Amino acid sequence: MRVLFLTHAFPRQSGDVAGAFLLRLARALVATGTDVQVLAPASAGLPAQDVIDGIPVERFRYAPRRWETLAYTGTLA
């Protein structure tokens, strides 16, 4: 089985609290043999592609960099 998590918040690194419950769920699914991938918003300083605790993460740009102020910062300004 293959599962795609499409989310507005996913941990930026192991131990991050943003979307931590999704990382726990993803790890549990992988332990059952499920192929899990994550598509999450980009943020300054994060790579476009990453692997967190064995889970592949691809980050998408949702606005020009200077306007990407919603994901992880919680601000609209």
Image: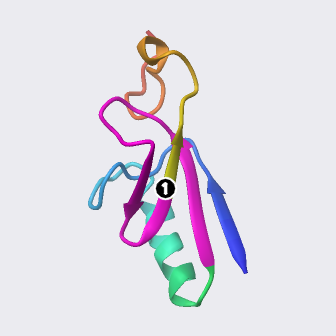
Q: Is residue 45 magenta?
A: yes
Rendering coords of residue 50 (x, y %): 40, 54
Image location (x, y in percent) of residue 21: 46, 63
- The residue sitting at the bottom extreme is 32
Residue 64 inside the magenta-drawn segment: no
In the picture, the quarter occupied by the N terminus is: bottom right
Q: Position of residue 51 (x, y in %)?
A: 40, 62
- Give percent across and percent down for residue 47: 37, 42
Residue behind mark 1: 57
Residue that extends furthest to the right in the rendered view of this protein: 1
Left or right: residue 32 versus residue 74 is right
Span colored in magenta: 35-56
Name which residue lies at 34% across and 29% down. Answer: 44
- Callout 1: SS: strand
Tell me if mark 1 has few (under 14), some (14-19) or many (20+) residues whose alpha carbon lies within 10 angstroms of its own: many
Query: Relative to the observer, which residue lies in front, 65 or 72?
Result: 65
Q: Amino acid at mark 1?
A: Val
Q: Please report the residue visible at 37 percent of the width from the left and 28 percent of the height from the top.
A: 73
